[in-house]
Amino acid sequence: MTEKRIMVVEDENLTMMFITETLEEFGCKDILEYACGQDIIDSVKNGIIPDLILMDINIKGAKDGIQTATEVLQFCNTPIIFMSAYNDNKTISEVLNVSLYGFISKPFNERELYIALQLAIKNFSEKNTVEEKRTKTKIELYDNCYYDLETESLYLFNNLITLPYNQRILLETLVKNINVVVSKESLASRIWGIKEESSSGIRTVIYLLRKNLKGIEISSQSKQGYILKAKYL
């Protein structure tokens, strides 16, 4: 949290002071304060983009917190935590229509604020990871070697590589679960259609695959299974 820029929109001086001091205690160094919605809108329009926004709903000015957040999100993809003394169904419904990252009911203490911040950051990160997986179809196995998930094809120096059946199925299974342990039973089921194939059979397939793809990183995870270390391009 120490490296993140946090914008706080709050028109009550004492509440703003409490939030700012609490964020500083959490290690936050880049905190921007706003007393009305138009000021934060102008900031993001000018390219000052936060990592997270704490938005009071009932703020002074022509736009309330909900309206301000709606406009801010047109210029940046940022998680917003709403703050309000009102937590009736209408308010919560309006919040959910704008942002799913958090709502904190006033008054709140340091721990409640910390939990809200951590959950918002975690949920935002996980959402971006899922979206990245949806939009990115190429996985780099090592330098100049990648797997195209869309076509289920393997390329080395941009040349299509054809593997023997067992190696191809094993790679296909691992590459769809990169950086996650895949059990030996799952691999055996995909390759041979059974779960009882001996570990030596899987080791042989992996050995041959490593010979064909000398830079590939497949490691054994004790008795759990195997993991392919790779990244999205």
Image: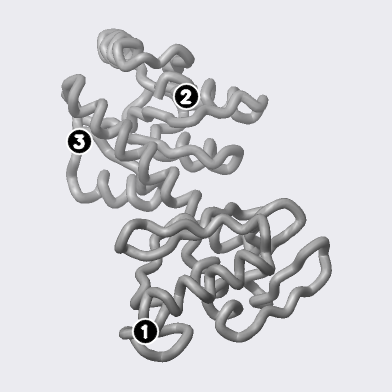
Label number found at residue 218: none
Labelled disc at residue 4: 2
Rendered image quadrant of residue 6:
top left
Q: Residues within 10 Å of mark 3 (few under 14, many from 20)?
A: some
Q: Which residue position holds label 3?
A: 86
Relative vertical location of residue 96 with respect to residue 87 in this rendering, above or below: below
Which dot, 3 or 2, sits closer to the camera?
Answer: 2
Mark 1, Cα crowd under 10 Å, few <14 / some 14-19 / many 20+, is some
Instruction: Give the Cα separation between the discs numbered 1 and 2.
Output: 49 Å
Q: CA distance from mark 3 to mark 1?
A: 60 Å
* Residue under numbered circle 1: 197
- How far across and down, in percent of the image, does residue 26 sit? 31, 17
Circle 1 SS class: loop
Residue drawn at the location 30% of the way across and 39% of the way down? 119
Residue 19 lies left or right of residue 51; in this view the side is left
Q: Are marks 3 and 2 in contact (CB under 8 Å)?
A: no
- Residue at image coords 28%, 31%: 83
Identified by mark 1, the residue type is Glu
Q: What amino acid does circle 3 point to? A: Tyr
N-terminal-most mark, 3 or 2? 2
- Residue type marked 2: Lys
Q: Earlier in the sequence, mark 3 or mark 1?
A: 3
Quarter of the figure with the N terminus = top left
Q: Nearer the viewer, residue 42 or 146?
A: 146
Where residue 216 appears, x then y in whole percent?
Answer: 61, 58
Point out the residue furthest to the bottom here.
193
Q: Residues within 10 Å of mark 2 (few under 14, many from 20)?
A: some
